[in-house]
Amino acid sequence: MAHLKIIHYLDDQELLRVRAPRTDLVEEKALGDDRFSLVDGPFDYYERSLEVRSDSNKHTVTEEFNYHLSVPWFGVLFRWPVRHALRNRRYDGTQPFWAAPDRLGKRATTIFATLCAIAVLSGFLSNAPAETHTYAADEFNVDQLSQGVLGALIRIGTLLAIACAVIADRHGRRRVLAWAMGFGIAASCAAAFAPSLGIFAICLVVVRTSNATLAAIVMVFALEELPAGSRAWGLSLLGMSAALGAGFVVWAQPIAGVAEWSWRLIFLIPVLMIPVATGAIRQLPESRRFRGHVPGAKLRNYWRRIALLGGAYFLLGLFLSPIDWFRNEYLRDEHDFTALKVSLFVVITATPGGIGLYVAGRVADLRGRRIVVVVAAIAGLGLTTIFFNSSGVFLWPVALTAITLASGLLPAMGVYRAEMFPTAVRARAATIVGAIGVVGGSIGILAAGWMRVRWGSFGPVMFVLWAGPILAAVLVWRHFHEGTRQELEALNPEDAPSD
């Protein structure tokens, strides 16, 4: 239980304001005798009380708070910001910059924090193959084209995740998340002992299937629980959590340079996440929108929306997946980076990108999704093509700026995977859209590997593939709606319960 005491010296008007119930980070109700309790806010328990000593029109007020945050796993990160927000009351009812644009209640806060914990595991499972395959290729003695084939092959796992999404739409989100975490951790550990490239690829297909399921269901679950004006903000936080998990791979990457086989140790790290996985599932109830959804919607009625959104993801995947898959190869092969230097490069250039990701999420909620997508695809990914044509110290600032701008694609595009489909088909549609993007990514990886072998450099390859994101930006700008601050039931009337 946290305790906070503040002493104020107030005049009559200021005293009236302090005695009014708060409506900023927390919504209060008056109990009488200058005591206030919780109506809504991110707390398991909350109480505020005032002790007033008056002298003429001057008042000494002792304000005390007793509260317990409903933020599992990450609560320690919010202790100081919450205390600061309680000390500095906002009388206009707005939320602090670090908080969601809308006030989050106890249920939404607990569920969202738990989903962020699961996203950490998802980020690790997503990044481990991309960061380590270049070292595995050395042990298995394969070239860039073969690495491209491996990268395209393991992405089949995203197609297999569609079956898991069917279960999630029929039987709930929570159960599927539990199975996906279990299989993901087990397959990652199995990859550490793979005796051949073929067995390694099979393990990575299972890892990819589990992670694609985790990523899609976590996103759907979060968007079904968050308020209408905070969906893109929520995806930015999920993206930052996944980046934290991906960062574990990057921080561990120097291990891969110790010996030819030492990359295998990185795939054993998920064992440490088993307590997080089991605890996260205990924290989760079922999605409120799934429990109350109107059944009967058929996936075949939404193929046009799937084709539209999937097309944008396909075009983006043509460029994004080769970047993810070949960045380390580019740094090692064309710039002679060691494993340690690669790790430092990724940490230094990617970490500030979290700021861009967070800002993009708030802008997408407050100003609209399409402008964020256009800036990220054209400016952010345009700078990425310059990065693949740069050298020397210029690599570092270009990569940092590119990642910061391009990170807006995650929240601005991700919200459409929930907003464009009703609850009964949302998990399937979101996973299919992701699978279409992965098909584009697989084609991009194969094309990039083939062109790299023929041209001898990744620079011209990335300029060619950048055409995909440019076309995606045009598609989004011309054909996509703005769902900012609209409830999912308003965007999908078939979800609204009938009288």
Image (cartoon, rainbow, N blue to C red):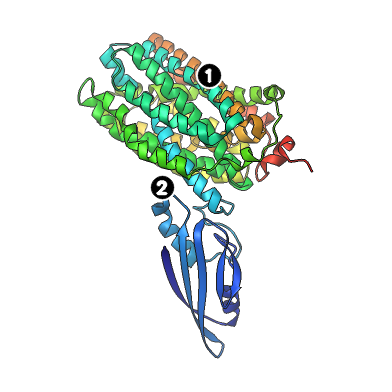
* Disc number lying in front (1 or 2): 2
Residue 245 or residue 369, whichever sits in front: 245
Residue 287 placement, left or right of 274:
right
Helix, strand or loop status at disc 1: helix
Give the answer, above or below, for where 313 lies relative to 225.
above
Residue most toward the bottom?
A: 56
Who's the residue at 47% across and 68% down the image? 65
Q: Which mark is residue 440?
A: 1
Type of residue at label 1?
A: Gly
Q: Name the residue under label 2.
A: 73
Residue 496 or residue 263, whichever sits in front: 496
Badge 1 crowding class, 10 Å Cα cut-off, few under 14, some 14 to 19, many 20 or more, is: many
Who's the residue at 44% across and 23% down the image? 208
Q: In which quarter of the image is residue 232?
A: top right
Who's the residue at 49% across and 23% down the image? 319
Give the answer, above or below, for where 258 lies relative to 293.
above
Q: How far apart are marks 1 and 2 (CA)?
A: 35 Å
Q: Which mark is residue 8?
A: none
| Residue 333 appears in the figure | no
Residue 230 placement, left or right of 327:
right
Relative image position of residue 10 (x, y in whole percent): 53, 80
Give the answer, above or below, for where 424 lies relative to 37.
above
Q: In which quarter of the image is residue 187?
A: top left
Residue most toward the right?
A: 499
Type of residue at label 2?
A: Trp
Relative image position of residue 123 (x, y in whole percent): 42, 33
Relative image position of residue 131 (x, y in whole percent): 35, 26
